[in-house]
Image (spheres, helix red, strand yellow):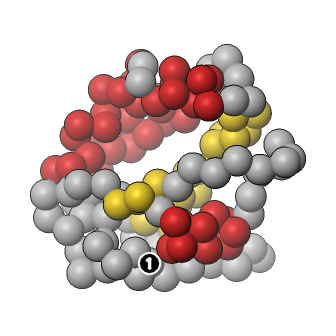
Amino acid sequence: MRFLPGFVYYAVRSMMQSKKAEGNLHASAERQARVVFWTITVWEDERSMRHFRNSGPHRRVMPKLANWCDEATFVHWVQDTSEPPSLSQAHARLIAEGTVSRVSYPSPAHATRAFPPPPAPA
């Protein structure tokens, strides 16, 4: 929990960066119970996504996550529409196809991607 202020600082900065980035079609973040966070971004093309990923606050925070997080997974996919997926769709893809990032202190669910689903929309 001692890393939470730094995480939140960079999460806000990264979200602002993504919303201003060329080629960004959607960016959202949602907090689940305790310290579980979901982010979804939709990009015009892979070049735009990679430019965002490799620059600014996002690039500066990524090396820190290995020590800050006990779970970190991402998934990229191409779809025919620019409509963002729902959290339940993103969760299903994350479980099925996600890439597990290296973390220093992994949770038991980290390697297997056995993450509980996000809450259903109200």
Can the viewer see residue 6? yes
Name above or below for residue 109 compared with residue 64: below
Q: Judge by depth and name the residue closer to the eye, 17 or 52.
A: 52
Q: What element carries label 1?
A: loop
Quadrant where the C terminus sits is bottom right
Which class describes the residues within 10 Å of circle 1: few (<14), some (14-19), or many (20+)?
Answer: few
The image position of residue 115, as x and y in percent, is: 44, 78
The image position of residue 43, as x and y in percent, is: 69, 34
Location of mark 1 (residue)? 115
Can the viewer see residue 2? no
Q: Judge by depth and name the residue closer to the eye, 1 or 86.
A: 86
Residue beneath the point at 83% across and 42% down: 82
Quadrant where the N terminus sits is bottom left
Q: How many marks?
A: 1
Name above or below for residue 43 compared with residue 33: above
Q: Name the side, left or right, on which 19 lies relative to 79.
A: left
Residue beneath the point at 40% across and 75% down: 113
Q: Judge by depth and name the residue closer to the eye, 59 or 97.
A: 97
Q: Name the side, left or right, on which 39 lies relative to 5.
A: right
The image position of residue 84, as x and y in percent, is: 76, 51
Residue beneath the point at 51% across and 21% down: 51
The picture quadrant where one finds residue 70 is: bottom left
The image position of residue 50, as x and y in percent, is: 51, 27
Residue beneath the point at 20% across and 68% down: 106
Q: Inspect the image, locate mark 1, and give the three-letter code of the amino acid beneath it.
A: Phe
